[in-house]
Amino acid sequence: MAEQIAEVAAKSVEALLADGAGVSALRDGQLLWSLAHLWDRPRYRMLAEQVAEGSGGGEAAVCGSLALAEGLAACGYWTRARMLVLQSLARCDAADYVGESTPKGARCLGDWAQVLSACTRLLHARADRELQIAAARAVAAILNYHYHPDLGLLLFAVRRDFFRFDDHWGTCVHSEAALAALTALLDEAVRRGEAHLSALAGRYLRQHVEAAWDPVAGGIRSTCSAGIWSAEKPGAIQAAAVGALATLHRCQGGDWEVEWLDRVRAYQRNCATDPLAELRCLVRCTREPNEKLDIVK
């Protein structure tokens, strides 16, 4: 499986390089994350150093800065990744913040998912009070404000004061953001050793998967608003669902997890997806290598 991960990682790197390194924080972050899975190959090690040294948060959107932070963290640039996470969180707190095409000042589920994912990775390597506070904020926001108990699902966005919107945003659900947030919660639960958090994230993941599944043709549907699911079922979302279910299975494997992991994976195999989504799915279905690139922090 390690060779399969390396092969897909190499394909992901080539696809990302086709758009050019240094073009955006988002692409650089994705590229670094892929390169972290080729740590033992000198050519890719050198490329990772070049990309990391040439990348910068600058005027990037928050999602790009957080993607870059995740990539830097994966490659061992702990201090730079920490700085980007905390800067991004501060930008999200601004009254005029607009993220992922949401209304002015909205709080975005995808942002919390990225913040939590990056914090968890960094905290695995080193304790840090500010990152622990940031991770706790992300967990609280996802569970206490984005979760809609009447729907049993996570909302894509809430108002700046954390109340729900009165328009279509008040019932808007995006599988991509929800799956990312729930996977991040599971990872954080493992890091903290919190069975309650793991069980809660697992329950919410189960609710999302069962609600988003197309009962006629199969597959995890992309978006839902006012109780109506869209017909779109991108391959990347199927891969994300497989990865989330594989993570849940490692945390609390049971009959439901096995059944749905097999069901979604069977559908995903027939979907076109990009190498990066495939790589993330493979990594989730196995384990990330313990070894990291030996780069100056």
Image (tube, rainbow, N blue to C red):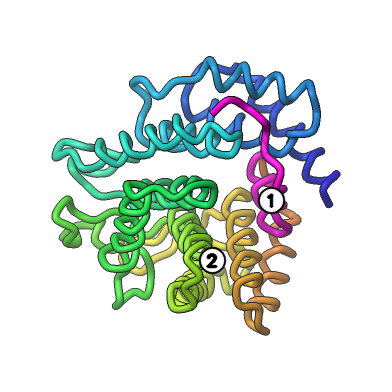
Relative side of 92 to 1, left or right: left
Q: Residue at x 34, y 74 (%)?
A: 151
- Secondary structure category for the residue under label 1: loop
Q: Residue at x 49, y 55 (%)?
A: 180
User: Is 276 one of the magenta-colored residues?
Assistant: yes
Of residue 171 and residue 247, the one placed in the foreground of this image is 247
Please give the range of residues in magenta. Answer: 275-297
Query: Height in image: 167 above or below 128?
Result: below
User: Residue 9's spot in the image, x, y percent?
Assistant: 73, 37
Relative side of 202 to 250, left or right: left
Q: Answer with mark 1 or mark 2, whichever residue precedes in sequence.
A: 2
Q: CA distance from mark 1 to mark 2?
A: 14 Å
User: Residue 186's spot in the image, x, y percent?
Assistant: 51, 65
User: Residue 150's spot in the image, x, y percent?
Assistant: 29, 77
Q: Which residue is mark 2?
A: 190
Amino acid at dot 2: Val
Q: Which residue is mark 1?
A: 288
